[in-house]
C-alpha cells in the first residue's frame, strides 16, 4: 500500500539553527501539506502546496518557514531559525485530486528545539 | 470558516462496551468530515470519511459514524470496544471549495479498561 514517508523520525536541534524536515508523498498525489502537533494539543494546519506553489498558509507559517518540492518526489519544510516553541510533531500529508479524497499522513517528525 | 469541537478530551470504556466519541462541526458550506486515529508514536490513520453520499458511514476496525446535518454532528461509534482501540481520535472537516486543508478538533483519548 502506498504511504507517505517522513525523515528523520526525530530531530534535536539548538535554538537558532536551521532544520529541514523531509517527506516523500504518495507518487500520484498532487496536493501536499504540512501540519504540526504541539505536545498535548490538536493538529494544526501549516501550509498547503499545489502545482509547485503555496496554495494556502496559516498564520503560524511565517517568514521563518518555507516549503519546497525540489525534485518532483520530495517535499520539504524548512525552519530557518528555530525557536523553543517550534518543538512539536510535524506531519506531512498528501492527497489526490477530487474534493472528497482523504489526506494520507506520514508518521511524523518529532522536532525538539533545545 | 470551519471549526470542529470534540466533546470530551478523555473517554474511558470497558472492553466490550459501546464506544461513542462526539464531534460537532461548523461550516457555512457543505462539509466533508473525517475521523482519524493516532496510535502512540504513530501518524494519523483514516478511520472513515463522509463526503455527501450516505449519511451513515462505515470505516475500518468496526467503527462507524453518522452525519446529522440538523445537529451539525458526526459522532463516531463502535458497538464493542477492544483493548486495541485505545488511541487518540481526531475529527476533522474540510470543504470542496478550499485547498483541502483539514481543520481538526482537539482530539479525544480513548481508554479501554479490561
Image (cartoon, rainbow, N blue to C red):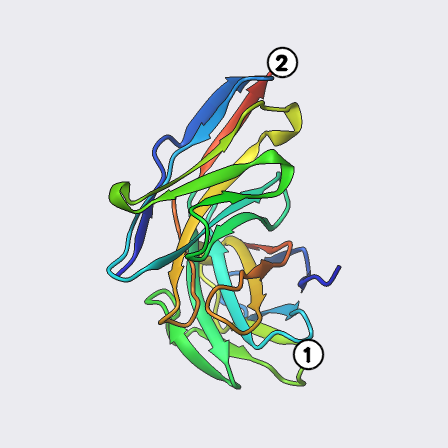
Q: Are marks 2 and 1 in contact (CB under 8 Å)?
A: no
**Number of the front mark, 2 or 1:** 2
Chain of the residue displaying label 1: A
Chain of the residue displaying label 2: B
Return the x and y of residue A114 as percentages of the image width and height: 53, 53
Q: Is A52 rendered above or below residue A21? A: below
Q: Is A87 rendered above or below residue B6? A: below
Q: Quadrant of the N terminus of chain B?
A: bottom left
Pointer 2 residue = B114
Local SS, label 1: loop
Labelled disc at residue A73 = 1
Local SS, label 2: loop
Crowd around label 2: few <14 · some 14–19 · many ≥20 (10 Å)? few
Q: Quadrant of the C terminus of chain B?
A: top right
Q: Is B34 rendered above or below residue B102? A: above
Viewer can see residue A13: no
Crowd around label 1: few <14 · some 14–19 · many ≥20 (10 Å)? few
Residue drawn at 59 percent across, 60 percent down: A104
Residue B49 vs residue B104, the one in the foreground: B49
Return the x and y of residue B111 as percentages of the image width and height: 54, 24
Q: Residue B38: which quarter of the image?
A: top right
Give me the C-alpha separation between circle 2 and circle 1. Answer: 45 Å
Amino acid at each position: 500500500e502506498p504511504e507517505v514517508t517522513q525523515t528523520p523520525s526525530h530531530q534535536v536541534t539548538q535554538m537558532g539553527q536551521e532544520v529541514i524536515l523531509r517527506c516523500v508523498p504518495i507518487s500520484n498525489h498532487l496536493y501536499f501539506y504540512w501540519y504540526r502537533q504541539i505536545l498535548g494539543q490538536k493538529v494544526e494546519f501549516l501550509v498547503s502546496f499545489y502545482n509547485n506553489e503555496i496554495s494556502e498558509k496559516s498564520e503560524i507559517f511565517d517568514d521563518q518557514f518555507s516549503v519546497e518540492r525540489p525534485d518532483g518526489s520530495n517535499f520539504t519544510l524548512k525552519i530557518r531559525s528555530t525557536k523553543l516553541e517550534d518543538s512539536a510533531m510535524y506531519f506531512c500529508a498528501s492527497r489526490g485530486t477530487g474534493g472528497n479524497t482523504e489526506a494520507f499522513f506520514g508518521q511524523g517528525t518529532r522536532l525538539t528545539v533545545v | 470558516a470551519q471549526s470542529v469541537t470534540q466533546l470530551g478530551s478523555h473517554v474511558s470504556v470497558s472492553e466490550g462496551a459501546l464506544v461513542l466519541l462526539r464531534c460537532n462541526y461548523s461550516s457555512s458550506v457543505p462539509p466533508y468530515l473525517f475521523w482519524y486515529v493516532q496510535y502512540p508514536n504513530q501518524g494519523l490513520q483514516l478511520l472513515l470519511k463522509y463526503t455527501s453520499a450516505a449519511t451513515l458511514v462505515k470505516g475500518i476496525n468496526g467503527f462507524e459514524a453518522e452525519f446529522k446535518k440538523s445537529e451539525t454532528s458526526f459522532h463516531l461509534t463502535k458497538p464493542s470496544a477492544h483493548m486495541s482501540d485505545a488511541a487518540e481520535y481526531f475529527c476533522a472537516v474540510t470543504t470542496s471549495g478550499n485547498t483541502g486543508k483539514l481543520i481538526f478538533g482537539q482530539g479525544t483519548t480513548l481508554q479501554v479498561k479490561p
